[in-house]
Image: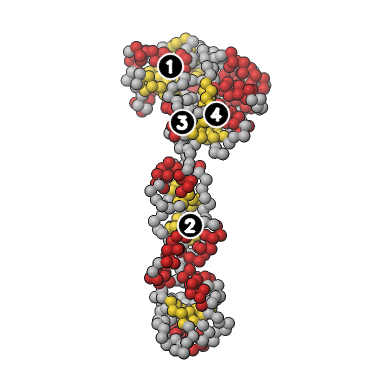
Amino acid sequence: MNMIYVTGHRHPDTDSIVAALSYAALKRINGFPAMACRLGEISDETKYILNRFHFDVPARLDDARIRLADMPLDRPFCIGEEATIFETLEKMSRCRQPFLAVVDKCQHVKGMITTNDLGSMALADTALGIDLLKDVRVKDVAATLDGNILVDCDTLHLNGKVSIVTLSRHKADRYQVKDRIVIIGDDVPSQKQVIEAGAGMLILVWCTTVDPEVLELAKKNGCPVIVSGHGSMNTSRYLFFAPRIGQLMSRKVHLFHINDFMEEAAKKMRKDRFRAYPVIDNSERLVGYLSKDAGIDYENKSIILVDHNEFSQSVPNIEKAVILEVIDHHRINDFSTSRPIYFRNEIIGSTSTIVASMYFEQEAEIEKNMAGLLLSAIISDTMNFQSPTTTEKDKRIAARLAEIAGIEIDDLAYDIYFMSSNCKEKSLADFARGDVKAFLIDDKNVLIAQAIIPSIDEIVFTKEQIMQTADEQARQKNADLFVFVFTDILKKGSYFYFGGKEKNLFENGLFHENVLSRKKQILPMITSTLLDS
């Protein structure tokens, strides 16, 4: 079963983060692999709440498409450049894998070798075998033939050709042996004859002992001597498996990076005939193989959306994801899926209220810390039940959670708003990066940044500084209108500041009493003014 990613919107507030954490936990209780994610940086308020109830910040999700890191890769079996063809075939058989990447000492991919490549060598013209044996090493020949080296030489004189000297009345007279690898039996005079004729290497078969004079002559003439562990037929066959695989491998390798998107990899794979592709990490080391079958038959991430349903507020490329569920309390806008899904949308003050009610409906246990976390999110999103979006269900669920957590609601609300605010330590850019949501109103791009603060007295910036920052944010984010909203909890109202091309439609610095909810009050106000202009 694929991992299920549970995520809130791009500018996560406390409700968005908590809904993701709590709903992912509920899915795990029900036996599904699920993890909470976030799409942006979290606020000081959210950090305070997570720390207080001992929850980690969710991992960041940057794209709905699946990466190779999320794919089931084949194990990174490989072979070194110095390995012989024989060792390569043995490893392919042992690993039950018809291909291997050829790597250097740092596990960097230098080439690929497949059973098809090796089969082509066997069927190819003898010129290929000759080229390979020109540079063969004595130790590799001995290892491939299960043989013993009796004479070794630092420098070899090989032309890559092979002669098999058989018993006949002509001895070795009719054989061309100069610079060749010579396979010969235990006939001492013939052994001496081919060495004196300039043989490049002597491979002895069916020999239990070797005449010392032969060995002395071989040393004098720079001719290595190996006693094969096989008869003449198998010796001649296995000899061609002694060259290094680096001489035969394909150096044209189609590599993928572990962080590549499967979508892009699949496009490239469809153009090629290869059965598997090496995958490397940031250090360019081999980490596995992507099979062609896996690359053709894949799905992007399985995602559950909480606290939003608009694609514009969700993870990039959300339209390519497998959307499983939506748990939300906002308007339904541009949402569509290719298959039926579970969609729960309630007219309620907080998404966390919905999630908590699902725990109760399913009779799933809510631990003390989880209850405190859910309660904090409800308090935050309903502004301690002062927001006009608050419902009786929010209050009822909150009361049950407070009982489980052993917390007084008003005490927790005080801590959330006053202990986590840090207003005097924040810059205007910090507020602008906080709880921001994007809206398309009458073909105009509108960004509304809302900061919940204990009191406007905590804000140390002038009206002109706030307006200037609003203009800068509008330019940077290509918005027609950027709205700064500072919601004062003590005064139970909000201060408004505007930037961008449409700012002249609004008056800066006004306080709107009892205007607290972005969804139910602020957005309709902005929309009405833009539509009437």
Tag shown at residue 20: 4
Is 34 situated above or below 226?
above
Q: In the rendered structure, which disc, 3 or 1, sits on the residue that comes first in sequence?
A: 3
Q: Residue at x 44, y 57 (%)?
A: 112
Is disc 1 placed on a helix, strand or loop?
Answer: helix
Indicate which label's residue lies in the foreground, 4 or 2. Answer: 2
Q: In the rendered structure, which disc, 1 or 4, sits on the residue that comes first in sequence?
A: 4
Q: In the rendered structure, which disc, 4 or 2, sits on the residue that comes first in sequence?
A: 4
Q: Nearer the viewer, residue 156 or 31?
A: 31
Give the labeled residue for mark 1.
523
Is disc 2 placed on a helix, strand or loop?
Answer: strand
CA separation in Å, label 3 and label 1: 30 Å
Q: Residue at x 41, y 47 (%)?
A: 269
Give the labeled residue for mark 2.
99
Residue type, numbered disc 3:
Ser
Indicate which label's residue lies in the foreground, 2 or 1. Answer: 2
Is disc 4 placed on a helix, strand or loop?
Answer: helix
CA separation in Å, label 2 and label 1: 60 Å
Tags 4 and 2 in contact by the CB under 8 Å rule? no
CA separation in Å, label 3 and label 2: 38 Å
Residue type, numbered disc 1:
Leu
Q: For residue 41, say whether it is visible.
A: no
Is disc 3 placed on a helix, strand or loop?
Answer: loop
Q: Position of residue 266 (x, y in %)?
A: 42, 44
CA separation in Å, label 4 and label 2: 43 Å
